[in-house]
Each structure stands twice: as structure tokens, then as C-alpha cells.
Image: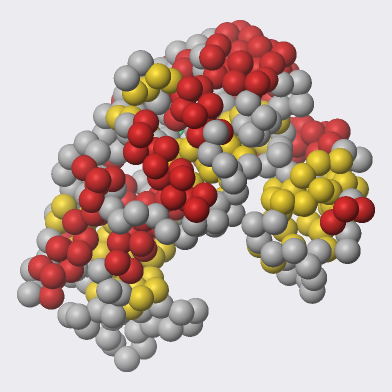
Amino acid sequence: MNHDPKTFRIKSFGCQMNVYDGERISELLTETGLAAATDGEDADLVVLNTCHIREKATEKAYSDVGRLKREDGSRPMIALAGCVAQAEGAEAKRRSPMIDMVVGPQAYHRLPEMLREAARGARPVETDMPALSKFDALPKRRRANPSAFLTVQEGCDKFCTYCVVPYTRGAEISRPRADIVAEARALVEGGAKEIVLLGQNVNAWEHEGHGLAELIREIARIEGLERIRYTTSHPADMTDALIEAHGEVEKLMPYLHLPVQSGSDRILKALNRSPTTETYLRTIEKVRAARPDIAVSGDFIVGFPGETEDDFEATLRIVDAVRYAAAYSFKYSARPGTPAAMMEDQIAPEIMDERLQRLHARIAETQLAFNRSTAGRETQVLIERRGRRAGQMIGRSPWLQSVHLHTSAEPGAMLDVTLTAAGPNSMTGALRQKDAA
Ligand code: SAM
Ligand code: SF4
């Protein structure tokens, strides 16, 4: 192993907050004098930015570590980061002698110091949760993707009975408003056209009496910024002010990720999710009254302990009632240390598989119906990356659909487009006259 790494690679798994953390770690290491390894190059340092949300994540992290051994028997310096690092702590060093350092999601600003300690042969572990100090210690943002993530809130106090987040990410904390606005400005100066505000419960963001709606209105005033999104929201924190913002703030995109998890009130209670399905549906109605074309997405868990066929059918019914434009569904995974892991009536894996398939099929139907409802619309598309075919680019519609189109425009361009055809997972677009040249 090279004790004086010059190049690094970061592998991020899991949620968008991990993607954000991965970007910040990359900026920090660059500022420290390391360079990102190029494609195909062996990096001197590999940071595995892990996810702990579902089972096998821990085992996967250790097998990912094992796979970093090269054919000649050498290996890079290895930092285990993210939520598995937080959950495992010093145990990680005992389980894998290849791990040189362990750093939790609230402590990665200490990586430069840890690299120096590792160079001296130590194997440092940092899993403290010192509130917001990491943000103060990170370098200013300089370059940004056309669509850039910005974490505004971390941790969670909701304690849903199945979820590890309150344990791995700690208590709910909101970053100060001025810091967020400064970071948003830096991202726009660095090339961002869209900012996605992130938090485990982003709509619980609160600072000096201001809520997320006010923060969105303030960020919307940044010149050069064209689009704002936020994710993930908890139904219990969906305030009227935020709903109103959807009708009034032009830059706020018509997309809302509002997970309900189950369509059965009995299961919602067991999940410790606060609103009932009726309250959830009323919230969706209010959001649609404020912004009729809004695309609603969600998350679902199937096979929670005690879930009956009736409970599951209620979930299928809520998919139909909401007409989701997109949704993620997961098989329940028992997480050590969570109350649900100790519950009786765990559901057999084959029943979970069968329910998951039926739920996927139902979501695919509502998603296709939503995509079809937008076909023929004239709208704007933010170009994000190249497609697989020559001359093809991929961008996003306001409703977060992937749009495939032919253009010579580069990532970051905002184009006037007609959505010409709807597919199950994406749209085809054509440039309108003004941009067609
Ligand atoms: N805070 C967000 C919320 O409450 O909707 C979600 C954050 S969580 C990182 C993302 C999704 O992972 C959840 O919405 C849930 O559907 C899923 N999830 C969390 N724990 C899970 C578990 N133990 N088994 C299966 N899915 C789980
Ligand atoms: Fe996990 Fe529930 Fe918190 Fe979401 S609200 S992060 S699902 S505990």
C-alpha cells in the first residue's frame, strides 16, 4: 500500500445525500493536493462511501473492500466512509485488515488529518457526530454539475420502526440559512442551473423561525439559477406554506417526492409513520390544487411484519388513487437495532417477492400514464449528459422525466423542447424552432 497517496477514487452507494457527501469529499481531497484518478487508472486511495439502509449492505461493504486487492497482491489505501462506517466503527478494522481508516458521515472533514495519521501507520476511526462542524471545515464549492445537490438538513428524529437513519445519521439538524444561500450562490457561479435541496426530512428544515418554503423563495432570487427541487419530504412536515410555494415560485419544479410507505393505516401505525392514508391523500389534493400538473413520486415498503394481503391491496389502491409519476418500492429488510427487527410475523421472502412484483407492475402503469399525459407538451429541458447514440443528449423535464433528444447543445443548456413520445421510463423530445439550428 502507498502511504503517500497522490490519486483517489470515491465510490458512493445509496441515497443522494451520499452522492453529495462524495462530491464534498472529492473537493476536500483535491484541496489537500490529491488528484481524482482517471478512468481505468488504479487509485492510490479508495473511499468507499457506503449505505446501511437495507440488509446485506454491511456484508457488501466488506466484500467491496476485499475486491480492491489487485492481481499482484498490492492494494490501495482504503477509507471506509458513510453509514456502514458509522454503524461498524472500530469493529470494521477488526473485521478487515485492509481497512486503513473508518470515517462516519458527520466526520469526513477530518480525512486530511486521518490520511496523515494513516501515513504514520495508525488506523484512525472517526465516528463522532459533531452537529454541523463538517460544513464549516469543508472548502468552498467551485464547480458544479448542471443539476447540483445541496444538503440543507441532516439526520432524523422520526424513528420509523424499520429505519436505521436516526442511528447512523443522528438527530435532525438544519444548516443555517445564510450558509445554505452562500453555498447555493457558489454552485450557481460554478455552473449549476438547478439546485436540489437535500435532507432525510428536507421539509422539516427550520432555522430562526423560517421553514423550507422561505428558504426556497430566498434561493429562487439567485440570478442564473433556473430550477429548484427538494427531496425527501415527510408527509407530516408538508406545510401549507410549502404547498403554496409550489403554486407561486416559478423556479420550483412541479415534482414532489412524498413517500407514504404503505396504503394500510394499520401498517402505517406499526411503521410509526404519523399521518393516516386519508391525511396523506388530502395533502396530495392540496398540492395538486396549488400546482395541477405536479408529478408525485413516493417510496413503498412491502412485507413489513404482519402485512396481510388486505394491507397490501390497500397499498395497490393508494398507488391508483395518487397516480404516481414514479415510485421506488423495497422489500422490508430487518435492520439490527430497529424495533421492527424484533417484531413477530416476519413475512416469508417468497410472499414479499410476489407482492413486490405486483406493486412494480402497478407503479409502471401509473408512471406510463403520467408520461403519456405529458406527451405533446412544449416545455424546457435541462441538458445533463450525453446519450448512448451519436448526437443524442439526455436532459430532464420539469417533471424529472429523462428526455432523450438530438442536439449539439452541451450539458447545462436549457432548451425549448416538445415532448414527442412517451416511454415507460423516459420521454423523447424534439427541439422547438428557436433552438433547432
Ligand atoms: N426520510 C425519508 C422518508 O421518510 O420517506 C426516506 C429516507 S430512507 C433513506 C429511503 C427509503 O428507504 C424509505 O422511504 C423507505 O422506503 C426505504 N427503507 C428504509 N428503511 C428500510 C428497511 N428497513 N427496509 C426496506 N426499505 C427501507
Ligand atoms: Fe427513516 Fe422514517 Fe426518518 Fe425517513 S422519516 S429517515 S424512513 S426514520
**x and y, in percent, of residue 62 in the image:** 31, 62
Q: Is residue 119 visible?
A: yes
Could you tell me residue 61's position as x and y percent?
35, 59
Left or right: residue 433 compared with residue 251? right
Q: Is residue 352 visible?
A: no
Quadrant location of the C terminus in the rendered image: bottom right
* 95 relative to 180, above or below: below
273 and 3: which is toward the camera:
3
Q: As drawn, which residue projects farthest toward the front?
A: 223
Q: Position of residue 224 (x, y in %)?
A: 59, 46
Q: Quadrant of residue 251?
A: top right
Give the vertical position of 385 relative to 424 (above or below). Answer: below
Quarter occupied by the N terminus = bottom left
Task: Give the residue at x 13% y 75%.
Answer: 119
Q: Is residue 75 shown left or right of residue 378?
A: left
Q: Is residue 245 above or below residue 103?
A: above
Q: Nearer the viewer, residue 287 or 148?
A: 148
Which residue lies at the image location 36% right of the left edge and 62% below the top edge? 27
In this view of the protein, which residue sits in the foreground, 49 or 179? 179
Colour convention: secondary structure
Name the residue rendered at 55%, 23% in the picture. Answer: 260
Q: Where does the image place residue 417, in percent across and percent down from the top left? A: 84, 49
Question: Number of numbered discs present?
Answer: 0
Query: Vertical placement of 72 versus 75: above or below?
Result: below
Residue at the spot 84% in from the left edge and 56% down from the top edge: 435
Residue 54 figure quarter: top left
Q: Nearer the viewer, residue 154 or 278?
A: 154
